[in-house]
Amino acid sequence: MQTLVIDTYPTNKEHYLKLLAFAKEVVEKLRAEGIGPVLWGGLAYFAYSRDESYNVSDMDLLIPEKQLSLALRTLKESPWTVDYIDGWDSIVVRKSQLRVELDPLERYCKSRDFALASFPSLSLSIPIVSLDELVAIYKRAAERSEDKPEAHRAKWERLKRKVS
């Protein structure tokens, strides 16, 4: 399994470090219940692109759809604000300005070929969708997105250069 060591920072380093610390708490709570989250979305984009001009606003995680209800029950017992977004089958966990979103793995990720993202500053390692899968995800988003197709297209273009 490929390991990506993430030791660079986006433009919003202070928020990013607080987000990672919060996300580590969320991941540990999920893992204690046997739920293994997988990193994807903007933070996965940052991990592969090393685009230091990028602004990481939240952390997106994928979990098996059959574990969404267990994750929701588990996270609702925490001191954080936890919302279920019906229609998207997503769970949003907030602590002040920090946000971690959990989405159903099967809806967004076709491959189960994961790499490992390592954040040494926090002693956090987490599976991450493969670069090929992330390229495919952003390609689909660029083609289908109604709210930000240009942003998705730019990420897709940058990531597919990494594959070549």
Image (cartoon, rainbow, N blue to C red):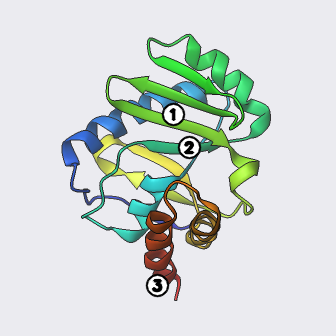
Residue at label 3?
Answer: 161
Label 2 to label 3: alpha-carbon separation: 24 Å
In terms of sequence position, does the residue under pointer 2 or pointer 1 come before the other?
A: 1
Sequence-first tag of 2 and 3: 2
Query: Are there few (<14), some (14-19), or many (20+) residues within 10 Å of tag 3?
Result: few
Whole-percent x, y for residue 67 in the image: 74, 31
Measured in 3D between alpha carbons, the distance from the residue under mark 1 to the one under mark 3, in whole angstroms, is 31 Å
**Residue farthest to the bottom, as pictured:** 164
Which type of secondary structure does the marked residue at label 2 adopt? strand
Q: Residue 61 carries which label?
A: 2
- Name the foreground residue: 143 vs 56: 143
Residue 65 in the image: x percent, y percent?
Answer: 76, 38
Question: Residue type at mark 1?
Answer: Val
Q: Seen in the image, is 88 located left or right of residue 101? A: right
Residue at the spot 28% in from the left edge and 58% down from the top edge: 7
Q: What residue type is labelled 2?
A: Leu
Q: Mark 1 points at which residue?
A: 27
Q: For mark 1, give the secondary structure.
A: helix
- Label 1 or label 3, whichever lies nearer to me, is 3
The quarter of the picture where the N terminus appears is bottom right
- Residue at screen point 45% across, 62% down: 45
Q: Do the residues labelled 1 and 3 touch (CB within 8 Å)?
A: no
- Look at label 3 and name its amino acid: Arg
- Work out whether mark 1 precedes mark 3 in sequence or the reverse, and give the earlier one: 1
Residue 51 is situated, as x and y percent measured from the top left of the image, at: 31, 67
Nearer to us of marks 2 and 1 is 2
